[in-house]
Image: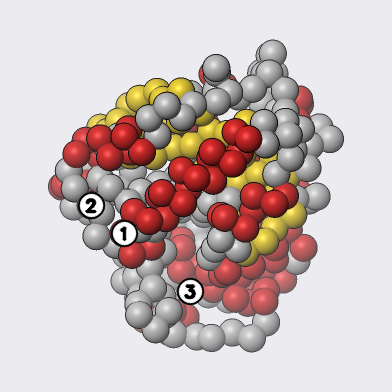
Amino acid sequence: MEEIINKKSCMPFLRWTGSKRWFTKSYINEFLPSSFNNYHEPFLGAGSVYFYLKGLDLTSGIDFHLSDSNKELINAYIQIRDNPEEVISYLKNFINSENQYYHIRQLKPRKEEKKAARFIYLNRTSFNGIYRVNSQGLYNVPYGHREKVDVVTEKLLLEVSRNLQGASFTSQSFEQTITNVKKGDLVFLDPPYTVAHENNGFIEYNQHLFSWTDQEKLRDYVKELIKKEAFFILTNASHNSILELYSGIGEIKKLSRLSQVGGRNKTRGSYNELIITNTTI
């Protein structure tokens, strides 16, 4: 954009492995087009880029279309947008302890507001904020022993609710979102990484969540965006297979970041990530 002014970004309300807060803090401005019509984010996650854009004065009048295949995640966003007080009320009744964690983890609430509160509570108190389910689709991440964490964050959730007003949410695959993208729109794509950084092989869990076939489908999705004359910014692992996959497609830039995942030595340190885009061409 011509000038980035009066940034008053709202903080994301979720802990999310692969969050792009590092990108919004240091790099995003150099990749934003000078202007765009509407905004689409098919892999919403923590929504770092969305919340950053909402803090820009220059995004007034833009429609935001946010989606993710994770239905529980999308429900949490919808309930925070529409019913923040009810979600906060449920959160105030949840206690951050190991026994309470496993009790709440096995609950199957019927009310959408309570489902959202459960999702947020587990995200705040689980190990590393990982979202993982077993073969039966049940959340199975262990307790994180973060005894001092604020489970409720009432002020933040109310601010998030204000920032979500007017945004549209859908739970669907990224391929399905293509029909809503028009010429001049901006699409931010942050898929689960199928390969590890710097040629270290496949990420075991993510290749079930987002396979190499999905990576190829995403490449085709990007080609379709180019045909539509839409803008795209895609993040991915810095890996030879990704470089080959996107050879001749847009511009590829390598950026360095610190790892945000703790708990195991092999996940710590500094890594490079790829940004693939047509906004700077």
For the residues labelled 3 and 1, the Cα–Cα distance comes to 34 Å
Q: Which residue corresponds to the image point at 56% horizontal and 69% vertical from the top-left?
A: 72
Q: Which residue was labeled with disc 2?
A: 202
Report the amino acid beneath label 1. Gln
- Residue 162: x, y in percent? 76, 49
Q: Is residue 188 above or below residue 2?
A: below
- Of marks 1 and 2, which one's residue comes earlier in the chain? 2
- Residue 42: x, y in percent? 58, 51
- Residue 85: x, y in percent? 73, 65
105 with respect to 157 (left or right): left
Report the amino acid beneath label 2. Phe
Q: Which residue corresponds to the image point at 42% horizontal and 55% vertical from the top-left?
A: 214
- Would you call the spot at circle 2 few (<14 residues within 10 Å), some (14-19), or many (20 or more)? some
For the residues labelled 3 and 2, the Cα–Cα distance comes to 37 Å
Q: Which residue was labeled with disc 1?
A: 207
- Would you call the spot at circle 3 few (<14 residues within 10 Å), some (14-19), or many (20 or more)? some
Q: Is residue 155 above or below residue 188?
A: below
Q: Quadrant of residue 118?
A: bottom right
Figure colour scheme: secondary structure
Report the amino acid beneath label 3. Ile
Is there a contact, CB below 8 Å, between mark 1 and mark 2? Answer: yes
Q: Which residue corresponds to the image point at 75% horizontal and 66% vertical from the top-left?
A: 83
Quarter of the image with the N terminus in it: top right
Figure label count: 3
251 with respect to 79 (left or right): left
